[in-house]
Image (spheres, helix red, strand yellow):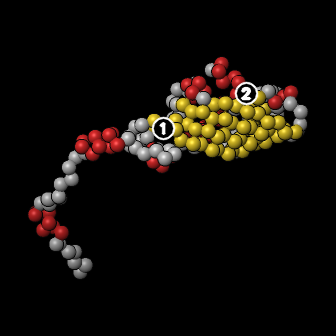
Amino acid sequence: MNYLKQYRIPFSGLSLGTHDFEFDIDKAFFDCYDYSIVKDGNLKALVNLHKQENMMVLRFGITGTVTLTCDVCLSAFPAKTNIEEKLIVKFTSDDMGESSEEIMVLAKHEHELDLAPLLYEYINVSVPHYIKCSEQGDNISCDETVLEKLNDLAPEQEEKQTDPRWDALKNITYNKN
């Protein structure tokens, strides 16, 4: 987890106003998370931090490619990613502040903001539920040899033969008398 220290912003020493930060995200970043959907990628995160007296507004722009695995042919392929997010960080003297998706609450004594979990979440949430080479990839199609093998292993579709005893039951009508 020492690798993730580079994704922290020590905001206590920053002056009021706007500050820009840039972070590179690669395989080493995703290796720090055991159950990550994304295992590899080459991304650049641009973070614009606007510091005010009692809050900060962060705007995230994450662009690049992530390596995904196709759900159909199981081939790994690069998929372009472009993520735009906004986060408001409020400071409170109470320890009981509630955070939500768009608002993070920190105690006034905090001096550092860890962006690694936020970046990880934004990237993994942007991954579609159904991943297919031809849909998320750039001019990529599924591996034909794997598709042929899957078609060979698929069970044959037979015409449905129904039992004549059950067919007779279909002719029963209900009297509403």
Q: Residue pushed farthest top?
A: 2
Q: Which mark is residue 77?
A: 1
* Depicted 44 relative to depicted 165: above or below: above
Question: Which residue is at 45% across, 35% downward?
Answer: 76
Q: Which mark is residue 8?
A: 2
Between the residue at mark 2 and the residue at mark 1, the CA separation in whole angstroms equals 30 Å
- Image quadrant occupied by the N terminus: top right
Locate residue 129 relative to residue 125 in the image: left or right. Answer: left
Query: Residue 104 location in percent, x, y?
Result: 72, 39
Q: Residue pushed farthest front?
A: 139
Query: Residue 119 location in percent, x, y?
Result: 65, 35
10 and 65: which one is in front? 65
Locate residue 162 relative to residue 114 in the image: left or right. Answer: left
* Depicted 163 relative to depicted 141: above or below: below
Q: Quadrant of residue 152?
A: top left
**Residue 56 seen in render:** no
42 and 86: which one is in front? 42
Q: Amino acid at mark 2?
A: Arg
* Depicted 113 relative to depicted 122: above or below: above
Q: Amino acid at mark 1?
A: Phe
